Amino acid sequence: MTLRFDRLDAMKMAALVTFALAVVTTGCGSSSPTQVNVSRWPLPQNEVSAAIDPNKPDVLLVGSNSLQEGQTRSYTSTDGGATWTTELAPPLATGFSEVDPAVAIDASGREYFASLQTRRRSDGLVDHQLFASTRSGPGGEWGAPVAVDQPFGLAPLAIDDKDAIAVDGTRVYLTWSRFLNWTNPKHNRYSIMLARTTNGGRSWSTPVAVTTTTKTINVIYASVGARGKNVYVAWEQGPGVGDLRVRVARSRDGGRHFGQPTVVSDRACRPNGWRLAGAPETGAPPAPQLVVDADGIAITYGSFDCRTRPEIHVANLDRQLRRLRDTTLGEGFLAVPAYDRDTDTLWVCWYATTDKVHMRYSCTLSHDGGRSFEKPRAAASLDSDETGPLAANGYGGREYGDYEGLAVSHGVAHAFWTDSRDLAELGEEVYTTTLREW
């Protein structure tokens, strides 16, 4: 990891920064939404997770990677996204660094921040373990990290990867990938795992396997949603990066046991792996994201059409995982859905593109459970482009990362994305805008 502390020194950054920045839109007319630079930190930020307090919609919590700092960042707003505070958070376990944030706020206002904490072993390999911290609310201090999984010792190489979080009342669920590898003889066991807490994150249940395989190289990008005793987990799985399909499984007992998975997506017409000119490192994986809505569940995912254009899909399934419909929203990648219970509205945001290089973060919504969607609107006023020499990649940034954020409540959506409009001064930044239903 190459650290760029010259930027840090030049800015003389404090440990905690409060700011509000309204970005002036250009060339888009008065209808362009106002954007706010959430991170405003002179190092690359990406992989954005966002949550809104279900009872106080002005309270927002966001997390992002800050890979060159070796930790994640927490961002808090108590005025509906107009101003933000930022800090390195949550705390690290001894000897660890931190990636892959997943944040949530439960019905009591308690805030959760899960992350993969990593450490380098004496043999040069890197361990990844899932932890979660909590705090009482936006003015509280993050508590010590609590281990959600204990993969070490299960195999010579044991790694947790790509966590996701969901809330149902005061029940909170975490899902992630667990990779176990042996070398003598060479074999592996890859699983999608789930754990839950009902005591505010003081402890987590023993992880259960949603699915396990020894025959595939990809069981990744898990996402979770819950309503009552029904818990749903979606993920992507395939024999290789050229044939990744989305699957989903359901638990009817609060996440203690899961039934057989249902295949959601068809094989891409011309499988293109994850390759995408505009994101040469991270590419455009299926990256499924799941939300529970009034009719059942909605899953967003990416695919490639017969001309190898990246497409965004929304699959709607009922509570028994019967497929209702699959809608293509347009070209793009890294979609994220959110369901507004107050207005029964399904929102979807993604990087929209027409040339596979220039991306503009955009959103749409459905008022009828995914049967139809409104014409998408741009959340960003400017394109992002990660193909230039200033784009951060490798351990220094990973371009757009693997996911973006969306939080909705009372007819208002807060979209969050990794933006590259100011790579020369700040690197990749977390931006947000507020959209109202149309």
Image (cartoon, helix red, strand yellow):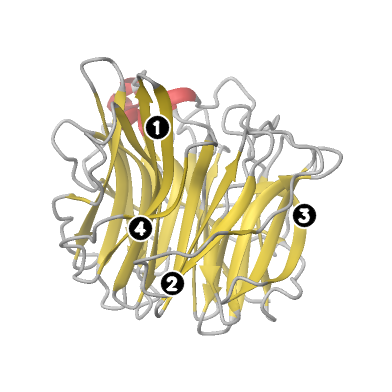
- In front of the other: 287 or 29: 287
Q: In this picture, is 224 found above or below 213?
A: below
N-term mark: 2 or 3: 2
What's the distance in space between the residues labelled 1 and 2, CA to CA? 35 Å
The image quarter in which residue 298 lies: bottom right
N-term mark: 3 or 4: 4
| Residue 267 visible, this angle | yes
Q: Mark 3 points at which residue?
A: 330
| Residue 25 visible, this angle | no
Locate residue 59, reporting x and y percent: 35, 70
Which numbered disc, 1 or 3, marks the residue closer to the eye? 3
Amino acid type at image mark 1: Leu
N-term mark: 1 or 3: 1
Specify few, some or many for label 4: CA neighbours under 10 Å numbering under 14, 14-19, or 20 or more.
many
Locate residue 364, reporting x and y percent: 68, 65
N-term mark: 4 or 2: 4
Residue at disc 4, secondary structure: strand
The image quarter in which residue 413 lies: bottom right
* 196 left or right of 357 in image: left
Q: Residue at x 22, y 44 (%)?
A: 150
* 306 left or right of 46 in image: right
Q: Mark 1 points at which residue?
A: 43
Locate residue 35, reporting x and y percent: 54, 55
Q: Mark 2 points at which residue?
A: 226
The image quarter in which residue 338 lies: bottom right
Report the disc number at residue 174: 4
What's the distance in space between the residues labelled 4 and 2, CA to CA? 11 Å
